[in-house]
Image (cartoon, helix red, strand yellow):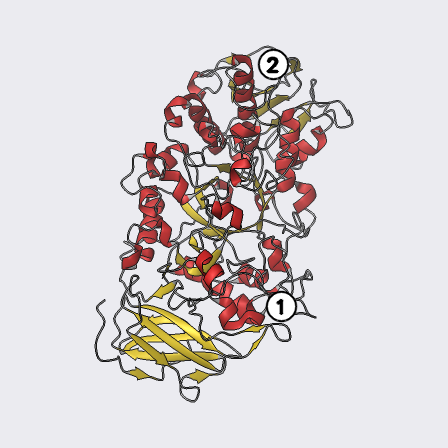
Amino acid sequence: MAARNAPFHTLPGHRHPPGATVEDAGVNFSVFSRHATGAELLLYAGAESAEPFQVIRLDPEVNHTFFSWHVLVVDLPPGTYYTWRMDGPFDPQGNGWRFDPEVELVDPWARAVNVCGWDRWRRQVEGVCPHDSPRGVVLAEEYDWEGDTPLRRPWEETIIYELHVGGFTKHPSAGVAHPGTFLGLIEKIPYLRALGISHVELMPVMAFDEQDVPPAVWQAGLRNYWGYSSYGFFSPHPGYCVDPEAGCHRREFRDLVKALHRAGIGVILDVVFNHTSEGGAGGPTLTFKGFGNETFYCLDVLDRRIYLDFTGCGNTVNANHPLVARYIIDALEYWVREMHVDGFRFDLASAMARDADGQPLANPPVLWGIELSDTLATSRIIAEAWDAAGLYQVGSFPGYRWMEWNGHYRDVIRRFVRGDRGLVAEVATRLAGSSDLYQANLRHPLNSVNFVTCHDGFTLWDLVSYTHKRNLANAEDNRDGTDDDLSWNCGIEGETDDPEVLALRRRQAKNLLALLLLSQGVPMLLAGDEVLRTQGGNNNAWCQDNAANWFDWSLVERNATMLRFVRGLVALRRRHPSLRRRHFLTGQPRPGSSLADISWHGLEPDQPPWDDPEARVLAFTLASLCETEPALYVAINMDPEARRFTVPQLPGGAWYRALDTARAAPTDLIEPELQPCHRASVLLVRGRSLVVLEGRSE
């Protein structure tokens, strides 16, 4: 937009809705700031404009209603960039106020933001410079959704695939027109569809500060890659846009959502409402600190210069303040209503269960507000049900329909597969949907999101290749990341060309994924695990925006047999409703069936080794839910030596071998029409492997 010589005329405007709203007469700007005594709106022609073409000083008698500052700029065109400056008292110790009329602020409700001249590290050295802040963009583009709406797939069909928008297509092998962007991801939808997953879970795509890293990390040339450093909660991240300077944020993100929906794939956003990129007392003022520091953040009651930090990131959002809770819910509803997303995964969600003083609340208003929102009623809502200060709520997260990342599941399955003894009773509980966590409070297996790997920690291949992390590349002397991933290197640490070790690692990887897809609850896969992507032993690759951390598409061919195995696992799960039950197993037959819904076994039928402290074997029979579904028999042997399992009889039918993780492709997973019949009463299960039999009537 070209600047005008004559200034735009202004009218008083109105306080609702917040943000920049295009109307017939122009653009209405409104922002909340309870204790500000003055406000200025700065208008820019574009992202590269060194100076604003107009600065509008708001009149407290005309442009101030309750706690909002507002103005309508007549005939202002969309595409205009803008910031705010707020004046008011500076009293960080007594009241927590941090008003500074020299600092330009990003509108918390901006529908699009761009970094413009933002340089976090220059500001830290030189202090605030004129016009050095990120800016909002006025948007008003029309968009044709072509009939698209958020998907309404049954919850029990959910299979989640966690991926990083940038890293999924940045590698040169990706071969896309726009690497590292929303549009680049569109080109890979056929791959996602062939994999069979139901939803992608996108790591943070709300605007985040890529410069939010410790000094040593920045000096090493690294940046915030994962994106858990948000500041623009209504704006898609400009770094994932092809043309962010033109304000394409919404259009390009909507194009991605629409394309995924056409392929039958839902979109879950990983959202970060527990903290922001402004950090603690030494962090920059970008947005919330300058509008209402004492409102948006949890502060120490005696010295309000001190930010309470339950996130490990310098601050904690005061999520249960009425205004902040409304802000969070408005943002979520916006992404559902205007962007058609299908759900959210909440990073460190337990921090959102705390009050302003940091105390856990039995019924946090913001979490119940999300739960009970009509707009979000059919959205997946998933909690990472812990925070960085020890509040661990897996199985007890407030609400009834919240799904939870099941950390208990991850830990016991990792330990069991690496060979730890005496875990079979808990393993059975996890495979059956974690009734110990969810049944007593009237929740269901679908509340449990099961996973063995995620972005945080080792990849699947590294989990079976490293016992110790290798994080020196993160420039923090290997101090970052967990020191115990419950991993096992299969005999040699790191890279090797030993064929026996490599074969064992592949088998272990298959074991982990097979157990995941055979479990009740909602499975989640980490992008790249299906082709054995490695991070070289780095278990905290949050700052590694490079080829070592990107999805290497050459692995699709090099590890094609593993990809085939994973696709087959997903297909097996999808053809077995008994693996996707809405309610907990009872151990009793359903009406019209002679088989109990589940029967547990050891080496002999109906003799599970619950009390054996040395046990590393377990088996179970799963009855079908309908006449067209075959029953399942699963025999698991995590002992190094082969074991013989006596197979229970299948009344009126026979067993057929569907899966054997000890075998090489293509006999490791066999399509139903090619499965060999297993008529023997004994089944040999080789060491560190599992076998699945499907039953058919005769």
In the figure, is residue 166 to the left or right of 600?
Answer: left
Q: Which residue is mark 2?
A: 686
Percent position (x, y) of residue 673? 42, 19
Considering the numbered disc 2 on the image, is that residue within a helix, a strand or a loop? loop
Crowd class of label 1 (few under 14; some 14 to 19; many from 20; radius 10 Å): many
Discs 2, 1 touching: Cβ within 8 Å: no
Q: Which residue is mark 1?
A: 305
Percent position (x, y) of residue 689? 59, 19
The amino acid type of the residue labelled 1 equals Arg
Name the outermost residue toward the front: 126
Considering the numbered disc 1 on the image, is that residue within a helix, a strand or a loop? loop
Question: In terms of depth relative to the viewer, which is nearer, 468 or 508?
Answer: 468
In the figure, is residue 297 to the left or right of 587?
Answer: left
The amino acid type of the residue labelled 2 equals Arg
Question: In terms of depth relative to the viewer, which is nearer, 573 or 122?
Answer: 122
Q: At x 77% / y 25%, what residue is drawn?
A: 613
